Image (spheres, rainbow, N blue to C red):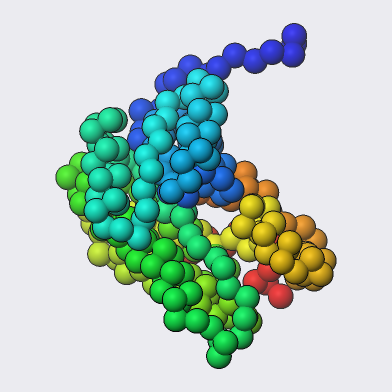
Amino acid sequence: MNGTSKALPADTLPFAGKVALVTGAASGIGRATALAFGRAGAHVVVADTTIDGGHATAAMIVESGGKALFVRADIARAGEVETLVEKTVSYYGRLDIAVNNAALDEEGAPLAEGEEDQFDRIMGANVKGVWLCMKYQLRQMLKQGGGAIVNVASVSGLVGMPNRAIYAASKHAVVGLTKSAAAEYARSGIRINSLCPAAVKTPMLARAVERDPASEKKLKAAHPMGRFAETAEIANAALWLCSEGASYVNGHELVVDGGFTAV
């Protein structure tokens, strides 16, 4: 071999011709997921409130030979979510896949010390945002006769998290929204699942460790594998849930946590 590689023919790519929308795709898990869909042949819509990061993600996909469109959207605002889906369909003609990844995590205090405005911000992004995204995505998928949605929850949606009660409540809500919607739309050819990662090497985690440097060693020790997940490992799980290989997986919370919830 000469050390170079050629792009695979489009018809051999697992998501060739599919349109995938990824929210929170300016960095972290969202960026890794958007890039993975691009490599797998999908036309990708990159959504985020961070303009520079969103454009950068879209540019990475295009530079790798894929197709991508960046749309700035605040998922906690109904009008912006509706416009996001409309722009997706206007640009690419359809919407086959949605990964609702955008979220907010700014907590770090016992429940009794929490602030009401913080509760509203976290719930607005993490719960209302996912609800709004599914609301408008489902309307389009119903018109088409099918689709796949993945909502990025967390292991915090499965177990309690001291000093992160609001965040944990929001992610439990995402799991509940997912299960309910999956049951409602299963006979319409739409599969809806949630993804529950533990600690992942993202800018969000880096900020948390920066606030409390001593937490890194303790947090790694809580994972039986002794490390944090790479964003690509979470992206791979999201792609599988949207693939034909997961055609009978619906209403499921896929845990990708290095064994965190096993102990």
| Quarter location, residue 27 | top right
Q: Is residue 221 visible?
A: no
| Quadrant of the drawing holding the C terminus | bottom right
The reply to whether residue 163 is in sight is yes
User: Residue shown at 63%/63% (left/top)?
Assistant: 198
- Image coordinates for residue 148, horizontal then vertical, percent: 36, 48
Residue 202 picture location, percent across and down: 64, 52
The extreme left residue here reads 143
Give the image quarter of residue 154. Answer: bottom right
Q: Quadrant of the N terminus?
A: top right
The residue sitting at 75% across, 69% down in the picture is: 212
Between 251 and 61, the one lying in front of the other is 61
- Is 97 rendered above or below residue 180? above
Q: Position of residue 243 (x, y in %)?
A: 44, 43
> Residue 76 at x, y = what percent?
35, 60
Residue sticking out furthest to the bottom: 112
Residue 40, placed above or below residue 168: above
Asked if residue 247 lies left or right of residue 217, the reply is left
The residue at 29%/30% (across/down) is 92
Query: Tag count in the figure?
Result: 0
> Which residue is more in the foreground, 207 or 166?
207
The residue under the point 61% across, 85% down is 110
Residue that extends furthest to the top in the rendered view of this protein? 2
